[in-house]
Amino acid sequence: MTTGEQGLARRAAVRLGAQATGLAAVLVVVLTAVAVVVLVEAQRAQVTAQLNGAIARADDVDDPPTGIHLLLRGPAGVVTASPGVPDGVADFAALAEAAAGGDPPAVERNVGEVQYEIATQRRADGTTVQAILDLTANHAERNRLLATMLVTGLLGLLGAGAAGTWLGYRALAPLSAALALQHRFVADAGHELRTPLTLLGTRAQILRRRLRRSSDPDEEALGEADGVVADAARLTAILEDLLLAADPRSERATEPVDLAAVAHEVGRAAGGAVRVEADARAVVRGSPVALTRALTALVDNAVRHARSAVTVAVHTDGGRAVVDVTDDGDGVDPAAAPRLFERFSTGARPGDSGRRRYGIGLALVAEIAAAHHGRVELVPTPTGATFRLTLPLG
């Protein structure tokens, strides 16, 4: 591959790597969100179990479980507390509510920078117990797990990006080699064809000059010579356009093109069987050679299948130029219609016979239309077939 082709392959591989990283990022975010929800719910269940267990087993306040403070209120209303209960953390209102037969919910309370979970219950023996759990250890464990998940996710994203780029480059290598081979073939074929075309044009011009200098010029022969010169120039332009189209790094030069004028030119070249209806200009921006090729292919397809007449109608519709190429033939086989614009799909019509066709013309029209931000389609008609080329006005 050339340096430019290697650069294209590398950029494509980087794009694949970025896409893999983006997909991995979405998966990591979703999995992390699920893991966080599960972790928080598990910790909440664990906290509830610790508080309920401490309340059920509490017989005094002197030896509470690690990380838990206890308050006991006896039937006489006397409240005792574990040593070291932080000021302001006890919920005396909940104690009074539970002692009166209520069922106060568990609450969280912040004292300073420490968060506590407080649960209060009245036991069957008439004692009301309040358990206060310091959540510092729970939060530390949760933060440690979240940090681990974050680091692991970032490493996974970096690995996914690197692996996606590497795999993309490996996957694209055969395709890049095939494209490079195709490009070299087209370039070589173009170079080999350019020389005989140049010679053909030169000889035709010499012949035309000699005919003009003759004392009794043959007007018919002179007209044919003019046609050969024009055809040689047209073939050279088509060859240059094909070479540009085959190189993904090149860009066609664009200019205003009147599709009505192109339609008249193509109609004249096709002969008297083609009627062109184009009363107004339909100017688009694009490659004159490519657009001429597209209309020529559509007209050639219509002439080949028409019984007696082909109509090319050019008009504008809003901000778009529309070209309808219609023939009065037998129409298109509905089974073949979906594949008409695929390469090597001939889209045979009823009664087709004769030399083999390769199904490239309509595919080239579709590619040219797409390159000009337009489209080509088969329009349903009662008889015959109508192909519509639609392009944005320039």
Image: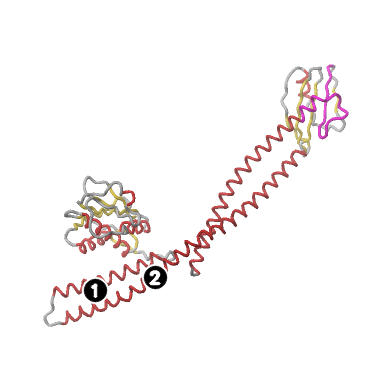
Mark 1: few/some/many CA within 10 Å (<14, 14-19, 20+): many
Whether residue 319 sits left or right of residue 33 in the image: it is left
Residues under numbered marks 1 and 2 in contact, where contact means CB atoms less than 8 Å apart: no
Horizontal placement of 111 versus 23: left or right?
Answer: right
Q: Position of residue 343 (x, y in %)?
A: 35, 57
Q: What residue sits right under mark 2 in the picture? A: 187
Q: Helix, strand, or loop for circle 2?
A: helix
| Residue 56 position by quadrant | top right
Residue at x-position 21% and y-position 62% = 270
Q: In the depicted view, which residue is nearer to us: 141 or 261?
A: 141
Does 340 sit above or below residue 202?
above
Q: Which residues are magenta?
A: 50-75
Q: From the viewer's side, name the closer residue of 268 and 394.
A: 268
Residue placed most toward the observer, 257 or 59: 59
Q: Is residue 135 above or below residue 130?
A: below
Q: Which residue is mark 1?
A: 229
Instruction: Give the Cα separation between the discs numbered 1 and 2.
Output: 24 Å
Residue ID at (34%, 60%): 285
Residue 53 forms part of the magenta stretch: yes
Query: Percent from the top left, x then y, of residue 54?
Result: 80, 28
**On the image, which quarter does residue 205 sit in?**
bottom left
- Identity, as a three-letter code, of the amino acid under mark 1: Val
Question: Residue pushed farthest left?
Answer: 216
Q: Earlier in the sequence, mark 1 or mark 2?
A: 2
Q: Please, is residue 221 above or below residue 347 in the view?
A: below
Residue 284 included in the magenta stretch of the image: no
Residue 39 as seen in the image, left or right of residue 58 = left
Mark 2 is on which residue type? Ala
* Callout in the foreground (1, 2): 2
Q: Considering depth in this image, is 242 or 281 the residue closer to the camera? A: 242
**Quarter containing the C terminus:** bottom left
Quarter of the image for residue 145 reads: top right
